[in-house]
Amino acid sequence: MTDYLLDSNVLILHLRERPEMTALLTQWGKEGALCISVATRTEILAGMRPHEEEHTMELLGSLENFPVDEATADQAGRLIYQYARQGIQFSFPDALIAATALHHDLTLTTTNPKHFPVPDLRLHPLGE
């Protein structure tokens, strides 16, 4: 059983009714937990169109939402610091998402694997 942490772009493809993404999420939901970081929740709500609110809130409510606790915040800060020293910009939301996956031992799924250059991260990249 694999539990997945879904990146914002995965949810956006589902909300935009991409059948292959909906089928994949349905399959994964039968096999394990589908989770999001509250950073992902924020990104989704920030980009939501007014007519999408009911469907979006229903989707977000169906997922396990992980808050940012001290351990996750500390790990995200360390990731940003570590990669900045290597000349790699790690965005604040992506660092929180990566730290959430690491802290909760989840597989992160995204269409943007280059945003998550962390070797210890279990990553399941998806094509768009």
Image (cartoon, rainbow, N blue to C red):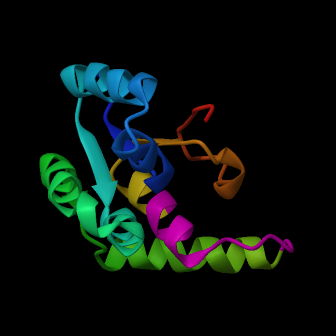
Q: Quadrant of residue 117?
A: bottom right
- Front residue of 115/79: it is 115
> Quick check: is 120 in the magenta stretch?
no
- Return the x and y of residue 56 as percentages of the image width and height: 23, 56
Q: With 44 as the anchor, is 95 left or right in this view?
A: right
Q: What residue occupies the far front of the structure in this picture?
A: 51
| Residue drawn at 30 percent across, 25 percent down | 28
Q: What residue occupies the far right of the structure in this picture?
A: 87
Q: What range is drawn magenta here?
A: 86-98
| Residue drawn at 59 percent across, 42 percent down | 111
| Residue drawn at 80 percent across, 70 percent down | 88
Q: Is residue 12 above or below residue 82?
A: above
- Return the x and y of residue 53 as percentages of the image width and height: 21, 63
- Return the x and y of residue 119 as percentages of the image width and height: 67, 47
Q: Is residue 83 above or below residue 1?
A: below
- Front residue of 37/75: it is 37
- Return the x and y of residue 66 as percentages of the image width and height: 25, 61
| Residue drawn at 64 percent across, 54 percent down | 116
Q: Quadrant of residue 107?
A: top left
- Front residue of 82/87: it is 87
Q: Quadrant of the N terminus?
A: top left
Question: How many numbered discs sit on the rendered protein?
Answer: 0
Q: Quadrant of the C terminus?
A: top right
- Front residue of 60/56: it is 56
Q: Is residue 50 above or below residue 20?
A: below
